[in-house]
Image: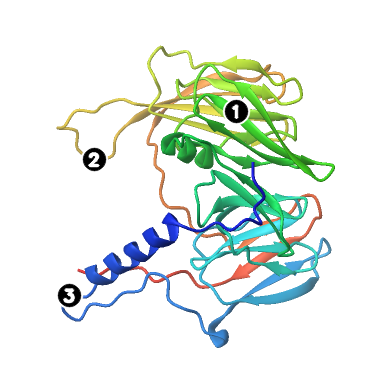
Amino acid sequence: MRDSGQARRGRSRAAAGVAALLALAACSGGECSFDRCPEVTPDRAGTVTGTDASGRVRWTTTIADLVVASPFVSNEHVVLEGCHAPHVLDVTTGSVSTPSGLEHVLGVVQGYAVGIPTEGDAIVSADRLDGTRGGLSWSQSPQDSEADRGYRMSAVVTERGVVGVHDRRLVAWSRSSGVWAMAEVELPVGAWRGRQLVAADADHVVVPGSDGSVLGVDLGSHAVAWRSLPTRPALPDDLEIRLDARAVTVTAWYRESRAASTIGTPVWTSERWSLDARTGEPTTPRSTARGTHQNPRAQVAASVHDDATGWTVTQQLDEPPKGSCG
């Protein structure tokens, strides 16, 4: 671990410059000119408002950016992903921080924005919301780009830190007494590609395993507390987990036909069951269903509610233009 106040420069900036030149070249044919993330002038800036538990609007602020994903709550802050930069807003005051060193923010931990750095080889880093120096920057040598990407895709932020799966290790960074400390838990399998972990609380997380199993990890004891598998012997085609209070609901999806002659919407069979996220004890019987399984692009949500404060934050930013050259 090294201090994030150290300069993070090098190959990423050069690669970004090359990518920009290639994109410009791709759109220079004929008279085509398309900007996927145009600048937003102050007079076109969108507004964000905070409403308290009684329904009264308590603050309004403007952000000159275009929103690309639904806002989400993280430890009494709202993370708003803009196409130019991520923005972090305090739920009750509306104060805005735009971390300059992060391309994507996973969440907020004790005054730090934790996420994926815009430059350098760090797997994840944490930058102070007040802009002062110091933080977390985690990298490994030798590098493993596949494991690094997997960690970023699986990682979630808890009350005290960030936790994700790197290869077949659950790696948790937590901040206590002003220090970032790492804890590791060996796993029997890696994480399901493209699915985030579920954080039940600061010490218990649920991992969608790469073999279709679901694992409950106790960070306090640094151990896998329980493991649950689908009843089918075959590997699922997709695996989803969702937290609802103390219970985690698991859905394993199986595509019934892969024949090239299949026409129309594929038919899937799903197996669903719920478990206590901390103990692994079943909370509902297993059930199966047959139908469609679609993952359409989610619409960007206008509002997000913070259960901890009772406040609601609403964004009214435009989305980036849709189109292309060619």
Q: Amino acid at mark 3?
A: Gly
Number of residue marks:
3
- In three-dimensional space, the C-alpha distance between marks 3 and 2, rounded to whole angstroms, equals 37 Å
Which residue is the site of mark 3? Answer: 29
Q: Look at discs 3 and 2 and give the one toward the viewer.
A: 3
Given residues 114 and 307, the one toward you in this image is 114
Q: Amino acid at mark 2?
A: Gly
Instruction: Please report contact status of discs 1 and 2: CB closer than 8 Å, yes or no.
Output: no
Q: Look at discs 1 and 2 and give the one toward the viewer.
A: 1
- SS at badge 1: strand
Among the 4 quarters of the image, the one containing residue 72: bottom right
Residue 310 screen position, x and y as percent: 80, 55
Crowding at dot 1, Cα within 10 Å, few <14 / some 14-19 / many 20+, comes out as many
Which residue is the site of mark 2? Answer: 264
Q: What residue lies at 57% left-to-right and 77% top-to-bottom?
A: 64
- In three-dimensional space, the C-alpha distance between marks 1 and 3, rounded to whole angstroms, equals 48 Å
Which residue is the site of mark 1? Answer: 170
Quadrant assignment for the N terminus: top right
Figure check: 167 above or below 74: above
- SS at badge 2: loop
Label 1 or label 2, whichever comes before in sequence order = 1
Quadrant assignment for the C terminus: bottom left
